[in-house]
Image (cartoon, rainbow, N blue to C red):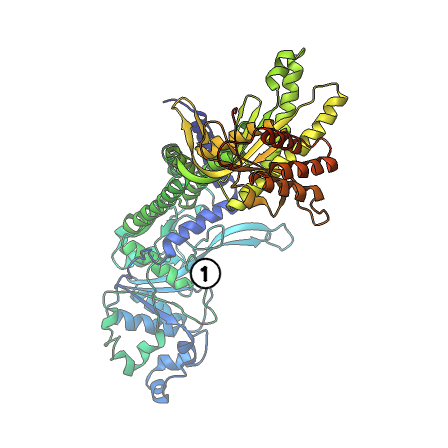
Amino acid sequence: MIVTPHRRALTVLCLACATIITLLYLTVAPYRSLETAAGDWLSTNPAARLSPRNPQLVYLGIGPAALSLDTLWPEDLEKSPTLRLMKAGWPWNRAVHAAAIDRLAGAGARAIVFDMVVPHPRAGDAAFRAALDRYADRVVIGSNLEKRLEDGGDGSGPANLKRTHVLPSASLITPASIPDSRVGFVNVLPDADGKIRRARFRTTLPEFFGIDAGPSDPELFSLPARALQKAGFGDLVPKTRQPLVLRYSEDFLPLSIHEIFVEAQWTKPPYRNGALFKDKIVLIGAAGNATEDRLQTPFGTALGPTIHLSAINAALNRDFLHETPLAIDLTLIAIAGGLAWILGATIRRPLIRLAVLFAAVAGFYAIVQLLFNTIGLLPIVFSPMLTLASSGMAWSAWEQVLDLRDKVRLRRTFERYVSRDVVRELVDNPAGWLHTIGGARKNVTVLFSDIRGFTTLTEAAEDPQALVTQLNEYFDEMVQIVFANNGTLDKFIGDAVMAHWGSITTEGEAIDAQRAVSTAVEMRETLARLNKGWEKRGMLQLSFGIGVNYGEAIVGNLGCEAKMEFSMIGDAVNLGSRLEGVTKSYDIDVCLGEHVAPLVREEFTLRSLDLIIVKGKTKPVEIFTVLGRRLPSTDEPDWLTVHEEAMRRYRLGEFTTAAALWREVLAQVPGDPVSTVFLARCLSLQKEPPEGAWTGVFEMKTK
């Protein structure tokens, strides 16, 4: 495969994005929190699958209703000694827990789980202990794994951090060297952001606190693990001591524990004389009271018992989530960068590439969500998507920079040869440019300028290099004037300049014509300034003729496959060139065609010149020259009125009167070349009157 600069830059960008994101993922904790949040979204968004609530689980809550018993009738309390003990206030006499065990066990519950830690003795322990012993095969109670600061023994020594397993009170369960199967630790460890996402089913005391276990350290089981064992599902308890990511279950709504002691409710749904609890795992824990333990999860705040229920539920449903190893995570980032490279290398149109890029990002997310929902796979989400999006967008942005740079470079290069209008059309609207290949008919204003006697100057030049320098200086000034008036520089023809208006863009025929004539006037003024400077530098003086014409022309990209040139052809163009040549016959520098004059008369002072037939044509055209711009502070010269009257008389064939009028003009403007030409013509016509009817048309014999 050929490695082009395009692909090299693409490779560098994609590799840089993938590398930066990999380093962020590996080393920056705040960034990892973004990845964690993306994983949480997989679990919590509306499309995420929750683990179905297993029907073998029942949640009995110790909540406000159970603590106050305000909803009960007095006769309910009279009928139940347990309710009277509960009414006495929290914490309850532990005989209440014994009564709950008896009632639930009598109903056929497979496991009765107390999500509570009872390290100290209290009233009713004897009854509670008896129930715990009586139903040892189905009851579970909580313990706690703690770190404690303890002194050396007499209170004076340094404090030591000790790790301890806080067991139920000895008044309930006698401590043993081997952990009692009725005891499970209630601890759940949050991730670094304080949210509970994992459950640990078995551990050792050192391992729980991040220390390697020794061979003599007994294995401890969590409350959910003990519940599964007591219910006969010991084989579903995960064998690993590592915490497992939970797929949280649907909400577990608690039933108030006091209701099982109210006979009127016990016999009715949902209890139906205890049928609700038959073969069920019943968890008893806080539910809305002041002693509850509230924990943070990806779903928000949750009660501690619901997390244990979710852990049991995940085990019963075999529905844990599986995080991908680091090697797979890094591979996904690399694949995302590679995919961005492929899109950048194969799709060159930016909008289409961006659309495919975002489709790829959405597709990746959809696949990950599908894997999460179906097989419980939990790969990283944010980093691959960010790599794909950032690589693709960075490349698109870089392409825009390159495109802008290339356009600027191309524009600067072409502007040395053609008009800014042509460059703008070519660079910014290539489709529009291509449309002109076949040609289009447009009304244009064309300007031709040509240096007088330049061929003779070149033959006589002693220093050709100095002449070329002078010519380039001339061209530079003239071209800047064309561009300043929004003209299109068509070409240089030797020492001649061809420009036009309306060929590419137009603001109206009058504006185009006015800009063309303004260009001619400014060229005249600029040449006068240049001549003064050249004279001081000992250089030759230059003069020129300018022809300006307006009409229809065929505009297009002309040439052959080897070389194309934006230009125009047509009678209006040819006449413009002829008008430039006409200036020699009248010793003037600017000649306007008859269709230009009415478009510019309000802006410029014009002088009627002649009615002529140019060489190669048969139809006469009226021509004019321009004296200057019309300014509010400047009136037309008096002699111009005399000239116009002389021209009218001349065209009527009144040569004597016309000659007299032109003598008046010469008296006011000595040496006026136009008056000199027409005075000589009138004198000649007086001597040799024209044959036939006089039309006032003068036929040009030269170009």
Kind of element beneath mark 1: strand
Q: Which residue appears at 42% of the width and 65% of the height?
A: 171
Q: Which residue is mark 1?
A: 295
Residue 419 in the image, given as x and y percentages of width and height: 53, 33
Residue 574 in the image, given as x and y percentages of width and height: 47, 30
The front one of 421 and 455 is 455
Q: Which residue appears at 44% of the width and 81% of the height?
A: 88
* Local crowd size for mark 1, using a 10 Å CA cut-off: few (<14), some (14–19), many (≥20): some
Name the quadrant containing residue 155: bottom right
The front one of 290 and 578 is 578
Indicate the quadrant containing the N terminus: top left, top right, bottom left or bottom right. top left
Can residue 93 be spotted in the picture? no
Total label count? 1
- Going by the image, does 410 lie left or right of 475? left
The front one of 700 and 575 is 700
Q: Which residue appears at 58% of the width and 41% of the height?
A: 515
The front one of 95 and 569 is 569
| Residue type, label 1 | Leu
Name the quadrant containing residue 316: bottom left
Residue 514 in the image, given as x and y percentages of width and height: 58, 42
Name the quadrant containing residue 329: top left
Residue 197 in the image, given as x and y percentages of width and height: 41, 53
- Going by the image, does 535 lie left or right of 422? right
Q: Is residue 212 depicted above or below 117 in this figure?
A: above
Can residue 122 be spotted in the picture? yes
- Going by the image, does 332 lie left or right of 137? right
